[in-house]
Amino acid sequence: MTYQHALDPATAAAALPRIRTIAFRDLVDALVKGLDDFAAMPTHAIFLCLIYPIAGLVIAGATFGFNLLWLIYPLATGFALVGPLAAIGLYELSRRRERGLDADWSHAFDLLQAESFRSIAALGLVLLALFGVWIAVAQTIYWAHFGYLVPQTIGDFAAQVLNTEAGRRMIVIGNAVGFLFAVVAFTVSVVAFPLLIDRKIGAAAAVATSARAVMHNPLTMALWGLIVAGALLIGSLPLFAGLAVVIPVLGHATWHLYRKLVEPDLPERKVEPRPPAEPRYAADFPSVMFTGWRRPRG
């Protein structure tokens, strides 16, 4: 079975791994192990996650630049939809450390050569599409309440939202709709990405397993979702900078939560050995970038 062909519906109908029942103490243990991984690999995790807060700052700057103040909150909260995609390198590092393998930060990019990369990329595109739809819906909700009126300052926007009936109604509706998007993203991805990294399975089957894990442990997984949302909110407050710590801790913890939730019924993903390092010479630049040619060893 070519499991890397990502969204084949037949894959979802195949035998799925069994799901365990977990309790609150398992969530605490996953967080403790996530903190331990972060303490063991702090520079690796921060390096991998810096792009997350930087992207937030860039988008916020662009939002101010285009005078789209009403999209700042949807953009900030919408980051939670793609958070699992941003943490895939962390899952790989936790997997390697758990098995006693070298957990150097560069191994996070071994996934680019993995058999499961197509499935991971396909599921990542689904989350990105969900993020795009959320932003479009948030824009439509704003237009439905205020038309095409453009607030000129943050103060004007705050007064518009907080001091009018339409603004308060928009807050309620917007948060309710955003909550539905978050539930969908959480349900399809909380277990799917770690499972794709760890086992031989297709994206559709991984999504089905993730949904089964949530439905089998509804209260516990709802509590985990609240923990994740609260941590992301706290990390976002100082201009997204706190996410450089929050995201790696949650990423490592999510790996350990996956290990508690899913029985290892399926074959492990094959660990692809790295090719031996080859010498590089300045004289080969820039042709080596386009041809892949290397000077033969002498």
Image (spheres, rainbow, N blue to C red):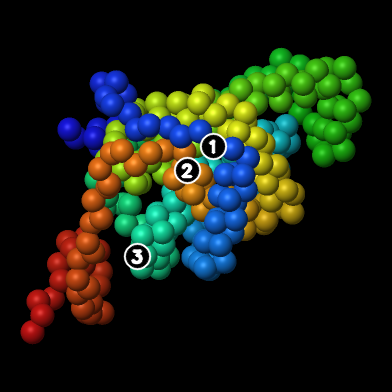
Residue 143: mark in rendering: none
135 relative position to 233: left or right: left
The residue identified by callout 3 is 101
Nearest the viewer among 140 and 176 is 176
Nearest the viewer among 264 and 40 is 264
Image coords of residue 245 (percent x, y) = 62, 58
Q: Which of marks 2 and 1 is nearer the N terminus?
A: 1
Q: Residue at x 46, y 34 (%)?
A: 20
Most extreme residue toward the right, as rendered?
163
Q: What element carries label 3?
A: loop
Most extreme residue toward the top, as rendered?
144
User: Which quadrant holds the N terminus?
Assistant: top left
User: Which quadrant holds the C terminus?
Assistant: bottom left
Q: How far apart are marks 1 and 3 (CA)?
A: 27 Å
The residue identified by callout 1 is 22
The residue identified by callout 2 is 260
Report whether residue 51 is seen. no
CB contact under 8 Å: marks 2 and 1: yes
Image coords of residue 19 (percent x, y) = 43, 32
Q: What crowding class fits label 2: few (fewer than 14 Cα within 10 Å), some (14-19), or many (20 or more)? A: some
Compared to residue 176, the image places residue 228 above or below, namely below
